[in-house]
């Protein structure tokens, strides 16, 4: 979400925003849920200059569906669902708090629509680490992303 205030284009917040903008590839997931995505999960995180964000993470490799894509058994659908996560919305960074907020407008998980995901961020070279701030159940989690080439 873009801020409409009197900050100049050269302000520290604008420079910080520009560090996020672009496409990021998932490097690792450290969390209780990481088992759902297997040993080699893949994902993409996109921040654009207009304040939009999109995230997709999936188990790698994806499970096969014995019944084919048209009529898979319920158990296979459940496994496939749990091994994929995606959402989109808007984003804003709070430099003073060292956080980025994803405002979810759409999500694979219906209960996440309308939520705000607050993440502490840390840049290290070409990598970006995001750690949940307000979710006590996920407080030991960290997703590490690397800027795509």
Image (tube, grey):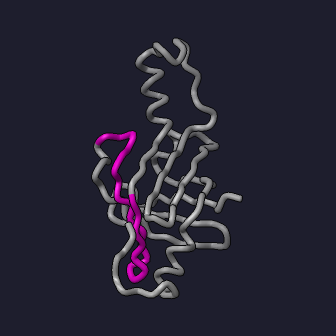
The boundaries of the magenta stretch are 90-110
Tell me residue 24's x, y (percent): 60, 58
Quadrant housing residue 120: bottom left
Our reading of the magenta stretch's main secondary structure is: strand
Q: What residue lies at 38% left-to-right and 44% top-to-bottom?
A: 107
Q: What residue lies at 58% left-to-right and 39% top-to-bottom?
A: 38
Task: Please tell me whether residue 108 belongs to the stretch shown in magenta.
Answer: yes
Q: Is residue 76 left or right of residue 27?
A: left
Task: Please tell me whether residue 124 belongs to the stretch shown in magenta.
Answer: no
On the rendered image, what quadrant is the C terminus found in?
A: bottom right
Depicted 146 relative to depicted 40: above or below: below
Tell me residue 3's x, y (percent): 36, 75
Depicted 54 relative to depicted 95: above or below: above
Who is closer to the viewer here, 141 or 94?
Answer: 94
On the rendered image, what quadrant is the N terminus found in?
A: bottom left
Who is closer to the viewer here, 146 or 48?
Answer: 48
Tell me residue 82's x, y (percent): 45, 35
Q: What residue lies at 46% left-to-right and 57% top-to-bottom?
A: 53
**The furthest residue to the right:** 149
Tell me residue 118's x, y (percent): 37, 64
Who is closer to the viewer here, 51 or 33?
Answer: 51
Q: What residue lies at 45% left-to-right and 87% top-to-bottom?
A: 8
Give the total of numbered labels: 0
């Amino acid at each position: 979400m873009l801020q409409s205030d009197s900050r100049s284009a050269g302000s520290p917040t604008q420079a910080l925003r520009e560090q996020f903008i672009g496409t990021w590839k998932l490097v690792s997931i450290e969390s209780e849920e990481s088992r759902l995505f297997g040993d080699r999960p893949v994902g993409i995180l996109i921040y654009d200059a207009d304040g939009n964000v999109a995230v997709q993470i999936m188990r790698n490799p994806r499970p096969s569906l014995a019944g084919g894509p048209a009529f898979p058994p319920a158990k296979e659908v459940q496994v496939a669902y749990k091994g994929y996560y995606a959402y989109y919305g808007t984003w804003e960074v709070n430099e003073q708090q060292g956080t980025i907020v994803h405002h979810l407008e759409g999500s694979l998980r219906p209960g996440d629509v309308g939520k705000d995901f607050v993440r502490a961020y840390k840049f290290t070279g070409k990598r970006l680490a995001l750690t949940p701030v307000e979710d006590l159940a996920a407080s030991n989690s960290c997703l590490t992303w690397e800027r795509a080439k």
